[in-house]
Image (spheres, helix red, strand yellow):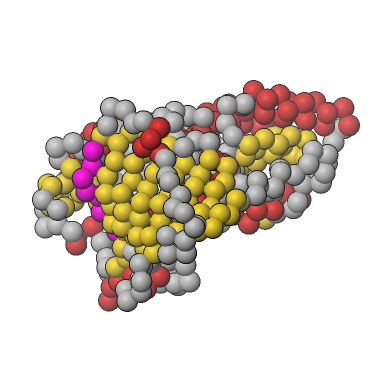
């Protein structure tokens, strides 16, 4: 597992069910500041500074608020709270409140210590726990305010590949910030980085949903009281269960699909809209790597996946990164372009992940030329076993004359 990664971090914009209209309209860069747009080198310089600052921010704490604006507000539950994290040991603790306008707040204490995850629902007086690999389910009420960039090795790789624009200087709660906008088809992400420490103070996910709301339909995460720490003790990631709280121990996840069984068929699209079907690739060995941009272990495994693709593509091996468990703030295509990975990318793979019993990522499957599962594994760090399984499948294919 990569040391400098945050566990299962997704910043969810919560815009499900809203029809995205006029997606090709110009992006709203000019709304934020009257300052003339600077050259790209300025934006890249700011992102490089922010990358170095976030990379070194491996452990610490901060307060955060996540809200929606415009149409997005109707489908967004505001979240406020405090996060303590240690990216090196994949530990997180968050205390949050969630409530829509006019509703009673629900308070949660959430934690994973690298072994198990715990959720306290104070309104329901309930206590749930689960193995560490299922932490994303229990930490869900607080995931909107967990920042994926902190402790990451390359937090802004995708942003730098998307031709970022420098928009000038804005004030966030008394902190002067450099503002960067990264466009994706007329929408995009706006970052506010403190000029003194280069850490993010605000993130805006802009959705241009209606012509009279240009730049107003967005999800906004604002940070305050950012405090790096030299060390964190085990006690910082402990939660005491109040007396009388009902306990619900979550079951272990379903095992991966069995070796020797037919692989379930699937149909997914590339970022360019090309349809790819598993059943159409009979006679070829297929490698599936379930991943997301927030997943540090996924990104740590990807260089070896690229090497596998480069070595065996000419021998009829099809390698695909199946993007899943991804939030609207993620940019898998931009990340892969920035890293110059050339193997296939398939989008919106959550339904396929469920069909393949994927409960944690990265998860790998190897499917032979007859459409049978010959290898499966969960977690990074065993890429040699993966490569050996693929080579064996290629050799077996040759022996059978597939």
Indicate whether residue 131 is drawn in magenta: no
Looking at this view, name the residue that lies furthest to the front. Answer: 243
| Residue 19 vertical position relative to residue 153 in the rendered view, above or below | below
Q: Say whether residue 337 is left or right of residue 309.
A: left
Residue bounds of the magenta highlight: 220-227
Residue 118 can be seen, yes or no:
yes
Task: Report the residue at 69% width, 53% height from top.
Answer: 355
Determine the image quadrant of residue 382.
Answer: top right
Residue 326 can be seen, yes or no:
no
| Residue 364 vertical position relative to residue 140 in the rendered view, above or below | above
Determine the image quadrant of residue 33.
Answer: bottom left
> Camera-side residue: 332 or 6?
6
Task: Report the residue at 35% width, 51% height from top.
Answer: 95
Question: Residue 222 at what x, y percent from top left?
Answer: 25, 53
Question: Residue 384 at what x, y percent from top left?
Answer: 64, 23
Task: Report the residue at 26% width, 49% height from top.
Answer: 63
Indicate whether residue 225 is drawn in magenta: yes
> Camera-side residue: 304 or 130?
130
Task: Report the residue at 30% width, 36% height from top.
Answer: 60
Question: Residue 322 at what x, y percent from top left?
Answer: 59, 46
Magenta: predominant secondary structure element?
strand
């Amino acid at each position: 597992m990569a040391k400098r990664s945050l566990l299962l971090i997704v910043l969810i914009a919560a815009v499900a069910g809203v029809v995205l209209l006029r997606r090709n309209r110009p992006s709203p860069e000019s709304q934020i500041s009257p300052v003339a747009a600077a050259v790209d080198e300025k934006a890249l310089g700011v992102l490089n500074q922010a990358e170095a600052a976030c990379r070194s921010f491996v452990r610490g704490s901060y307060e955060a608020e996540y809200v929606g604006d415009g149409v997005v507000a109707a489908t967004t539950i505001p979240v406020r709270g405090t996060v303590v994290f240690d990216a090196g040991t994949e530990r997180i603790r968050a205390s949050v409140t969630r409530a829509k306008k006019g509703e009673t707040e629900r308070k949660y204490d959430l934690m994973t210590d690298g072994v198990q995850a715990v959720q306290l629902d104070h309104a329901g007086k309930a206590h749930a726990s689960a193995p560490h690999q299922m932490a994303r389910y229990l930490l869900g009420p607080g995931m909107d305010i967990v920042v994926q960039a902190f402790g990451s090795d390359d937090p802004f790789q995708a942003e730098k590949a998307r031709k970022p624009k420098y928009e000038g200087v804005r004030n966030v709660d008394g902190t002067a910030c450099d503002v960067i906008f990264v466009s994706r088809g007329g929408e995009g992400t706006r970052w506010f980085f403190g000029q003194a420490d280069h850490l993010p103070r605000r993130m805006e996910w802009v959705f241009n949903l209606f012509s009279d709301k240009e730049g107003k339909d967005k999800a906004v995460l604002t940070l305050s009281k950012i405090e790096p720490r030299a060390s964190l003790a085990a006690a910082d990631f402990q939660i005491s269960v109040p007396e009388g709280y009902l306990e619900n121990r979550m079951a272990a996840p379903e095992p991966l699909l069995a070796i020797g069984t037919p692989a379930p068929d699937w149909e997914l699209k590339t970022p360019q809209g090309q349809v790819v079907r598993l059943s159409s690739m009979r006679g070829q060995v297929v490698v599936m790597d379930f991943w997301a941009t927030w997943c540090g272990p996924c990104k740590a495994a990807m260089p070896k996946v690229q090497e596998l693709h480069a070595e065996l593509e000419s021998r009829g091996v099809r390698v695909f990164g199946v993007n899943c468990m991804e939030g609207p703030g993620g940019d898998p295509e931009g990340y892969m372009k920035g890293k110059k990975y050339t193997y296939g990318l398939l989008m919106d793979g959550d339904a396929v992940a469920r069909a393949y019993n994927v409960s944690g990522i990265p998860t790998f499957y190897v499917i032979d030329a007859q459409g049978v599962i010959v290898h499966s594994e969960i977690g990074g760090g065993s890429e040699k076993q993966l490569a050996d399984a693929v080579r064996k499948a290629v050799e077996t294919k040759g022996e059978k004359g597939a």
